[in-house]
Every structure is written in C-alpha cells, then in structure tokens.
C-alpha cells in the first residue's frame, strides 16, 4: 500500500522524477519525465540516464561523478539544487533545475532526482536583465544618478552614474557613510532636514528637493533630487527612500545669468526713465520762464 501511495504521488507531481542505480540505469521514470524529455517510461527503463538526457559535454563529468557516488555515496550534484542543461529526445537542449538525493540499500547506492524545466524562468530573467541594461544605458546617457537612502541608519547606496555625476570614483568615498548629508552644502543641509519633517505624514510619499553637493574638484553642483518613501517605521518616519539625482548645475548657472541680465536691464530702464523725467521737468521749467518773459513756449510736452 505504501509503495502504491508513493508511486501515485510521484505520478501526480508536475516535475520529472527519475531514479537510477549505481550504473546510471533508469529504475523509475514518471509521467512528467516522459513529457519533459519526450521519452516513454517503457523506453527509458534500464537505459543509461546520462545517455538519454545529458548533453555530450556533460558525459565525461557525469561518468566521473557516478564513480565517486558508487564508492562513497557522494557526488558533485548530490544534496543540492543545480541548474544544468538537458537534452530532449529530438536533440533540443533546454535549461533544467535538478535536485538529487542519494540513498543506500544494503551495499548499493541509488539516486533520485527531481527535474524541473526552467525555460520560461530563464527567459523572464533574461528579459529582466535586458530591461535593466537598457534602463542603465538610458540613465547613464541622461546623466541620472540612482540612490537608495536609509536616513535613520545614516547610509545610502548609489549607481555608478551618481558617482560620475559628482566626479568621484567609488573608492573615493566611504561605502558606509551617508554621502547625501556629508557632501551637501551646509547652507542647504539645515533646510533639507527641516523639510523632511513633513514626510512624517503618511500621505506624503513623493518629494522634490534642490540643493548643492560638493564635487570631487571642490566645486558645488546643484542637484535636483526626486524621491519616493517606500518604507516607514511604526511612528511613520521614513526609513528607506529611493530616487534619482539630476545635475542641474548648468541650468542654475543659466538661470543666474538670466537673472543678472534682467537686473541689469531693470537698472538701465530705471536710469532711462529717470533721465527722461528730468528732461521733461527741465523743458517745463524753460517753457515757464519763456511765458513769464512774454515769449512763446519752446518745447511741446507730450
């Protein structure tokens, strides 16, 4: 009865289950293994498992590992989960996750393996990596620094572009330091920390700040910081904030130049208006003197 239950359970699982003896001969091959490798159980039983499903480049290592397993009950893939390539009956290779355990009956060693097709997972992982690479390329091209800040611990983490933005190499700065606060301009730090108080409100999760940070060459860079609070403590205080830093030094410099230019124009305009007003006043005084002398006014005042 127990044997029938075990067999029924092994046939019900979606992963391939295979048992081999010390010579790699297949002793058990469930329905999922049939579907996975395209080999019927009747055809697999008694055959060398490695010859059935292992790619050619694995055969030599499998033989060596099997010899060790027969002698000691140990092997390179035993008692662990490994990611390997497997071969179907039509010769197609695909990635699998394999968990193998050994057991001994009398003096003979046997191995049971659970095999799972991870093709879709690998595709998803590859898609994520490709997406991350594209994002990193885009962020690098746009000079965008990524940061992950833990304000209560006084630690933050950054991508390479964050360092390049300020002219640093990773090795230039203490990896455990709070770079945001140690590099921020003293005149901006107090206002920044004071402004953080409003984020104790759980409804306020997004924030925007502008401040100066000290670059590697000693200059001050204007930074636009956009962030989102993603973790809070029980009191509602932010414990983790992630976001981006954008170098807006050139924009600030341009704005300062425009501001100074507008101030110059305003001063010039005031001087010109004042001069015009004085000329009008002078002409009015001359006209008044001429009328008092019984003469016709010289200037027409508009």
Image: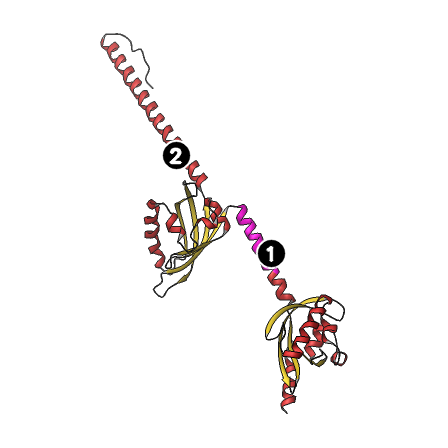
Q: Is residue 16 visible?
A: no
Image position, residue 140 (x, y; %):
53, 48
Q: Check the image and report above or below for 40 versus 232.
A: below
Q: Is residue 53 left or right of residue 173?
A: right
Q: Which residue is mark 2?
A: 259
Q: Nearer the viewer, residue 70 or 139?
A: 70
Residue 279 image-quadrant placement: top left
Crowding near pointer 2: few (<14 within 10 Å), some, many (20+)? few
Image position, residue 115 (x, y; %):
65, 74
Q: Nearer the viewer, residue 20 or 213?
A: 20
Image position, residue 126 (x, y; %):
61, 60
Q: Residue furthest left?
A: 292
Residue 301 image-quadrant placement: top left
Label 1: element kind: helix
Q: Residue at x 40, y 49 (%)?
A: 209
Q: Which residue is mark 1?
A: 130
Q: Check the image and report above or below for 62 versus 107.
A: above
Q: Which mark is residue 169?
A: none
Q: Which residues are magenta?
A: 126-142
Q: Check the image and report above or below for 194 versus 53.
A: above
Q: Is residue 278 visible?
A: yes
Q: Is residue 213 magenta?
A: no
């Amino acid at each position: 009865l127990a044997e029938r239950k075990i067999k029924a359970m092994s046939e019900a699982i979606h992963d391939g289950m295979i048992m081999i003896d010390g010579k790699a001969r297949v002793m058990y091959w469930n329905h999922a293994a049939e579907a996975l490798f395209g080999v019927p159980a009747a055809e697999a039983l008694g055959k060398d498992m490695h010859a059935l499903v292992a790619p050619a480049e694995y055969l030599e290592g499998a033989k060596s590992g099997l010899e060790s397993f027969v002698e000691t009950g140990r092997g390179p893939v035993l008692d662990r989960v490994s990611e390997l390539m497997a071969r179907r009956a039509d010769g197609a290779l695909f990635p699998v996750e394999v968990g193998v355990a050994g057991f001994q009956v009398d003096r003979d060693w046997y191995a049971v393996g659970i095999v799972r097709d991870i093709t879709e997972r690998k595709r998803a992982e590859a898609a994520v990596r490709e997406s991350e690479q594209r994002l990193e390329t885009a962020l690098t091209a746009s000079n965008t620094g990524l940061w992950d800040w833990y304000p209560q611990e006084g630690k933050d983490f950054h991508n390479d572009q964050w360092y390049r933005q300020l002219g640093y190499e990773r090795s230039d700065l203490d990896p455990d330091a709070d770079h945001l606060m140690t590099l921020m301009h003293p005149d901006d730090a107090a206002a920044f920390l004071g402004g953080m108080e409003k984020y104790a409100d759980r409804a306020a999760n997004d924030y925007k700040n502008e401040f100066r940070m000290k670059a590697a060459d000693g200059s001050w860079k204007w930074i636009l910081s956009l962030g989102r609070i993603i973790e809070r403590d029980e009191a509602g205080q932010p414990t983790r904030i992630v976001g981006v830093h954008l170098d807006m030094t050139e924009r600030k410099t341009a704005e300062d130049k425009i501001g100074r230019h507008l101030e110059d124009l305003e001063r010039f305009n005031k001087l010109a208006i004042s001069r015009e007003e004085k000329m009008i006043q002078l002409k009015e005084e001359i006209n008044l003197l001429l009328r008092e002398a019984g003469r016709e006014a010289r200037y027409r005042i508009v």
